[in-house]
Amino acid sequence: MAVLSSRVPHLTAAMLAATVLVLLSAPAACDNSIAPQGRVPESELGVSSSTPIVPPGYTAPDVAQLIRNFDNLYDSSGTVAVSEITIVRPGKTRTMRMRSWSKGDDKALIVIEAPVRDAGTATLKVGNNLWNYLPKISRTIRIPPSMMMGSWMGSDMTNDDLVRESSYLDDYASELVGRSDNPPGWKVKLDALPDVAGLWNRIEIVFSDDGLPARMQFFDRRDRLSRTMVLEDVRWIGGRRVPTVMRVIPEREEGRSTEFRYLSVEFDVDLDDGMFSLAHLERRR
Amino acid sequence: MMSVSTLRIAWRSLGRNFKRTLLVAGAIAVGQFAFLATSALMHGYGEQFFNAATGPMLGHAQVHAYDWREDRSIDLTLADIDGLLVDIRSDSNVAHASARIYAPAMAALTEDGFMGVVVGVDPETECHEAGLLPVDGMGELLGEHRVLVGAGFAKKHDIEPGMEIAIIGQDMDGSIASDLYTVEDVMWSAVEIIYALGIVMSLDDAQELLLMPDQAHEIVVHTSDRELIDETVVRLSHLPSLADLEVLSWKELAPFVITMATMVDLFAYIVLIVVFIAAAAGIANTMLMSTFERTHEFGMLLSLGCSPGRLSTMIAVEAAILGLVGVAIGTLSGIGFVAATSESGLNYAALGGSDSYEVAFKGMQFSLLIYPRIYAKDIVIAVAAILATSLMAVVWPIMRIVRLRPVEAMRS
C-alpha cells in the first residue's frame, strides 16, 4: 500500500493537495489512538530492538503500529480536496488555491484555481509520469526525468515528491528514541534500509500523544538535516481527524518555507479513471 | 681568442664522423622542434582559453546583484537596467556593455519536455566580436518571439529552424511563465550553457516572459583594451548607481584562467628541460667518444706545442657548432610547422580519431581546432638554452684533455 504519509515526508505538496488525500485507503487504517503496549515489540517488521529511553510514568508505544497508522493516515480509494499552498520567499509570499482528485496510489490531478494568473494550470500524475497543462499556450507537456528534482510550482517540493511512492514501514527500520519535549510526544527514528533508493538517510518523527505526527525532520544521505515538516491544526475533516496544515521549512535557506492547508477534503469518493487522462486534462479546459 | 683555424679544425673534426654528427644534430633538432611546436600549441590553446573566457562568456568585467552568482535565483535582478547601462557606458574605457537574463526553463517541441536555459540578450549590444552574437546579422534573428538555440541543444533534441518551441519557466512572482516561440536558427557558442542548453531570445522577450520589466541578471562589460580592465573595474565599482551591486573583473570571476595560463608556461618549461637533458646527453656522449677516439691525435698536437687551452677551445667550438646546427634545423622546422598551421589550425580531435571537436570546461566550450602561436621569446630562450647546454656538456671531455700527458696520449 502506498503511503500518503510517505509522500508527506517527501514533501509531497502536490500530494497534499491531490495525492496525499487522494491516495487513501481504508478509514479503518486511521486508528490514531495509541494503545499502551507495555513494551516495544521486537518481532515487528523493520523495528529496531535497541532500548528506548522511557521516562518513569510513561509507557512506550508500539512503534510499528504508529508507523502503520501514519502510513495509512490519508489513505483513501478516491479523494477530492481543495487546498491552499503558501510559498514564502525572502520578501515575498505567494498563495495558490488548488483543487485535486486522486485515486489509488498512482493517479492524481491537481488544478490551480487561484491566483488568476495561474488559474487553469494543471498537473496530472499517472504512475511515475507527470504532465503539466499550460492554459496560456494550450499545451500539455510531460516533465522529463532530468527535471523531476526541480521545484513544483515554485514551492519547496520537487516534482519527484509528487510521484515518489514509499512506505515508512517497508522502506525504513524504525526505532523508538524516547520522549520529546518540543513538540511533546514520542520521537521515532526511521533509518533507510540499505537496499532502498531515496533521498533520505534518516527521518525523525515526533508523534503527539494521540498518535498523530507533529513534526518530521528529514536527514539527507550525508545525514545532514535537510528539511523540517511541522504538522499542525489537527481537525476533523472528511470524517477523519488529521493534521490539516503542513509547513515545510528547508534548512540552510533562510526566509523560505512552504505551507499546505487543506480547506476541504472528501475521502473514499468514487472517481472515474477517465478523469486521469491527457484527453480529459485538455478537454476540461 | 678563437682563431679561424680553430674553427676550421673543429668543423672538419665534426665531418670526420659524419653519421654520428648528423645523428646528434638531428636529435637536438627534434628536441628543439618539439619544444617550439609544444609551446606554439600551448600558446594557441591558452589564447583560445583566454578569448573564450573573456570573450562572450565573462567579458572583461561583470555586474550582478550580490548572491546572484551563487543562488542564480531569478529574482536577484539588477533593477533600472537602462539607467545602469547608461552609467557604465559613460566610462570612456568601456567599449561594450550588455545586459543578460538567465532563467532555467522547460522546453518542448511536442508532448515531451526537456530542460533548457532561457538566455535573454540585447541583439544590438551583443553583436560584436566578443559578444554572444558575433556573426553579422545574428541580432536580426531575435525578437518578436523568435529564438536561437545552441548547437548542442539542437542536436540533442532534434531542433531545427522553423520549429515552434514551447518554453515553460517561473516568472519573478513565482507564477508559471509559458509562451510559444519560433526557432529562427541554430547557433554555435563558446559559452557552454548556450551551446548545450541555450534558448537565446531578445532581452525584451525574456523580460516579458519572466515578468522582469527593465531588469536583468547580469551586465557584461568589455573594455577597449585589456590593460584597462583593472582600473575600469575600480572606477565602475565607485559609481553611485552600482554601489550596492557586485562589480568583478574576469580575474575574480574565473581565477582558473590565471591558473591555466601558469600551467601552460610551466608545461612549456618542463618540455624545455626534457629537451635540454636529451641534448646535453647527446652532445656529451658525442664529444666524449670523440675525445677518446682522438687521444693519440691530441697527444701529437700537445707534443707539437699546441696548448691544452686551444684543444679545449676546439672541443667547445665543435660542441657549439653541433648545437647550433641542430637548433637551427629544429627552429626552422618549428617555424615551418607554425607557419603551416597557424591559419588553418590543428584539429586535436582528428588527431585523436574522434569526430567531436568541442570540449567543455568550466562553463566554456572549446573547439579542439587549435591555432598554434610562436613568440620570438620562445626561440631566443631555446637557442640560448641549447647553446649553454652544449657548452656545459663538453666540460667533462675538456677536463680529460687538460689532464692528458702528450707521451702517454701518443702511445694510446
Image (cartoon, coloured by chain):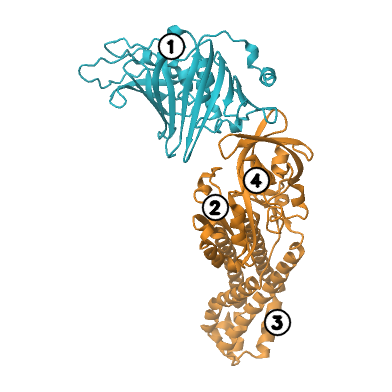
Chain colours: A cyan, B orange
Which residue sits furthest right? B162
Quarter assignment of residue A169? top left
Q: Tell which subunit mark 1 falls on.
A: A
Up-down: is A207 above or below B357? above
Gap in angstroms between the C-alphas marked 3 and 2: 71 Å
Q: Name the residue under label 1.
A: A240
Mark 1: which amino acid?
Arg
Q: Picture coordinates of residue B40 (x, y %)?
A: 67, 64
Q: In this view, does B343 lie to the left or right of B319?
A: right
Residue lying at the far bottom of the rendered structure: B305
Q: Is residue A244 left or right of residue B377?
A: left
Give the label, 3 or 2, closer to the camera: 2
Work out how far the residue at label 4 is from the one at label 1, CA to CA, in angstroms: 49 Å
Q: Mark 4 points at which residue?
A: B119
Where does the C terminus of chain A fall, quadrant-wise? Answer: top right
Q: Residue A219 carries which label?
A: none
C-alpha distance separating marks 1 and 3: 110 Å
Quarter of the rendering containing residue A236: top left
The picture places residue A226, in percent across and down from the top left corner, at 43, 33
The residue singled out by tag 2 in the image is B64
The answer for how far apart the CA atoms under marks 2 and 1 are is 51 Å
- Is label 2 in contact with label 1 (beta carbons under 8 Å)? no
Q: Which chain carries label 2?
A: B
Q: In this view, does B144 lie above or below A57?
A: below
Label 3: which secondary element: helix
Q: Where is residue A146 in the image (x, y as percent from the top left)?
A: 60, 33
Mark 3, residue position: B12
As drawn, is B203 to the left or to the right of A23? Answer: right
